[in-house]
Every structure is written in structure tokens, then in C-alpha cells.
Image (cartoon, rainbow, N blue to C red):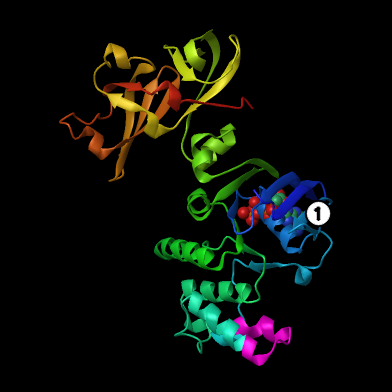
Amino acid sequence: MDEFLVIDHVSKSFGTQLAVGDASLAVARGESFSLLGPSGCGKTTLLRMIAGFERPDCGRIMVAGRDITALPPEQRPVNTVFQNYALFPHMSVWENVAFGLRMSRRPREEIRSSVDHMLDLVRLNEHVRKRPSQLSGGQRQRVAIARALVNNPQVLLLDEPLAALDLKLRQHMLMELKTIHEQVGTTFIYVTHDQGEAMSLSDRVAVMNEGRVEQVDSPGHLYENPRTRFVASFIGDANFFTGVVVEIQHEGYVRVLVDGLGSPLVLGSGDIASGHPLRLMVRPEKISLTLTRPSRVERVNAFPGVVEDVAYFGSHTRYRIRAGQHSILAQLQRSRFSGGEIDPVRGAEVWMSFHPDEGRVVHME
Ligand code: ATP
């Protein structure tokens, strides 16, 4: 991967409050990348350091091989789309987008063609004379994006770009943002606390927790192979079990004695030694449910439980099931029960099972 934007051991505290602690990551040219984490995890502070609004206490920030750590915001090859869009209310759409180019005294013809091109790209060419107050939320956001892109930044920073929009518009703008990114090819960095947004907008996501970058990976990899309990539960729903390896089986499978569950579980785990404690994670949709005990061949990782709660979501149904000391979440597609089998109801006794390859070992802490 070419390392276009590099965050190199960057830290920032406000008084005694650590906002970002020793963050390192590299973003490729043209990548769509997200900083994802709960409120207070430091993602905005990291974005503001890339933009130049905050100075790191230590570490370096590089773009295209150039150290920009000490540069003021206006000298960086970076632009920001702020959460509130920060448009000039007294200017038209066209003037808002042209503002930066006019300030830098670019030739009139160049300004006209760049602004027209940008307004085409964000599909606002029919609204050029309107003021921001005459636009919808999504249109205002597109003005802000056009204004930030018109002077060709190498990196575009977007701070919670969809937070101000209602649900329908958010889903629409999500697609728009993907299209705009594909068309301009600029490196986009999103800050968001919404995992769905980060996963669907980005090539890769950095998950942050308490000022630290916990994992950087593609959305699929983060979901399938979270390294920590925090990442596993922030990226989706997860069932966790702790236990001890009691037997190494053939080809990298281990048998685990699980705390608070009557049955041992088998896990494809690589090289974990016998006697080793571990934490294992299973996604709810990886758990199969049957009303009768699975046949002998399917009996690995099968254990009984009692349904405590059922929630119907249309496309899927979720079950909370008591098994030993565990309350386990399972999720089924409706169609899986189409073979005439009855849906388990509250109080029903069911069997849960999952394939040994669907269990994941995550860090103990
Ligand atoms: P949110 O999604 O709520 O904006 P965030 O993940 O973006 O949160 P930051 O805004 O980067 O988190 O804040 C990280 C930590 O640093 C928080 O504990 C916050 O209170 C603190 N912090 C951020 N900016 C300042 C500041 N200017 N002065 C003092 N503390 C700050």
C-alpha cells in the first residue's frame, strides 16, 4: 500500500485528559477511510490535528511524504467539511463554492469552470442562485462538499457528515458520497460514531477507543475477525464466552471448557496451547437453532437452551436464549424456517449450534 497520509505516533492531551494516545495509521492515496468510535474516543481530535486546528503534543503527520505537522490549516493540502456545513448564509450556492478560489485570486475563467464542474458533480447545477436557507439539508451538505473539493485538496476530511440528516436522507447521501468519492478520487477521511455508516462508506476503518486506535481493517475483516472485545461489540452484536483450552485436536482445532456452559466447545483457533485461557466470540447470525437435538454429525458445538425473548424484525428474527449462565443472542433469517419448521416461542427448549470455524478468539482484556 502506498502510504499517502501517515499518522506517526501522534498523541494529544487537554490538561490531564488524554484525547489521542500514540495513534499510528497510514491511509492510501484515493482511499475512503473512517475514524470510528464512541463519543469521547478522540476521533474528532485526530481529525482536527490532520486539518491543522490542533497541534499534536508529539508525533508527526505526513501527506505525500511531506511533514505537515507544523503547517497552519490554510497551507495544508487538506480541506474539511464541517458537521454544520458552515456555509455563508448571505451568498448564493455558486458564490459559496467560488469563495475560496476568489480569495486566492484565481483567474475568472478558471473559477467559473471549476465551480460549474463541482456543482455538476454534486448535482446542484439547477440551484446555483439559491441561498443556503432555500435548500434541503442534503443539498446544503452537497454545497459544503463542493466548496471543500473545488480547490483540489489532496485529502478531504468529513466530520460526522450524515449526522444532521434524517434517516431517509442519510441513506440517500450515503450513496451520493460514495459516488462523489469515486468520481473525484480524492482521499476521503470520515469521522463517525455510526458503525453502519463507517462500514458502508469506507475501504478501511480505524476503530478507536479511549484515545487509542484498536484496529484498522476493511469492514469485512473487522466484522469477521475483530481482535478485541471492544471492536467485536462496537462493530456488531456478539456473544462472548471465556474458557480454557483442554485439548489440541487435529488441524488447528482446540476443545475449550467454557465457563458457565455445560458443554465444551470446539474452535478453529490456530496455535493455542493446552491450559491457555481464552475469550471466544460468536456472531448471533452464526448460531443455528433447531427444536430437536442435532444429529450426531452436526452435534459439535451443539448445546441446549430456553428461549427468553423473541423479537421480530421482518427480514430476520432475534432470540435471546438462556444456556447455563449465559444469555445468548441468535439471529435467524425468516426463510430458514420455511421448511415447515415451527418458530421457537418464549419458553421453548431449543438447541443452538455453530460451526467450529465461526468462533473467533479475541483478546482477553
Ligand atoms: P464526539 O463524537 O463526542 O465528538 P470524539 O470521539 O470526537 O467525541 P474528541 O472530541 O476527540 O472525541 O474528544 C476526546 C477527549 O478529549 C474527550 O474526553 C474530550 O472531552 C476531550 N477534549 C476534546 N477537545 C477538548 C478541548 N478543546 N478541551 C478539553 N478537552 C477536550
Q: Quadrant of residue 109?
A: bottom right
**The stretch drawn in magenta includes residue 141:** no
Along the horizontal axis of the image, is 140 left or right of 39?
left
Residue reaching furthest left?
Answer: 340
State the residue in front, 144 or 298: 298
- In the rendered image, residue 134, in percent from the top left (x then y), is placed at 48, 83
Task: Report the quarter where the C terminus lies.
Answer: top right
Question: Who's the residue at 45% across and 16% down the image?
Answer: 266
Q: Quadrant of residue 208?
A: top right
Left or right, residue 75 beside residue 236:
right
Main SS class of the magenta portion in the image: helix
- Measured as percent of width and height from the top left, residue 292 is found at 24, 18
In the picture, residue 348 is in which quadrant?
A: top left
146 or 64, which is in the foreground?
64
Farthest residue to the bottom: give it: 108
Give the residue type at disc 1.
Answer: Pro
Which x, y percent locates residue 296? 29, 11
- Whether residue 90 is visible here, answered yes or no, is no
Pointer 1: what residue?
Answer: 56
Q: Residues within 10 Å of mark 1 (few under 14, many from 20)?
A: many
Q: Position of residue 60 (x, y in %)?
A: 81, 52
The part of the chain drawn in magenta is 96-110
Residue drawn at point x = 62 percent, y = 84 percent: 98
Residue at disc 1, secondary structure: loop
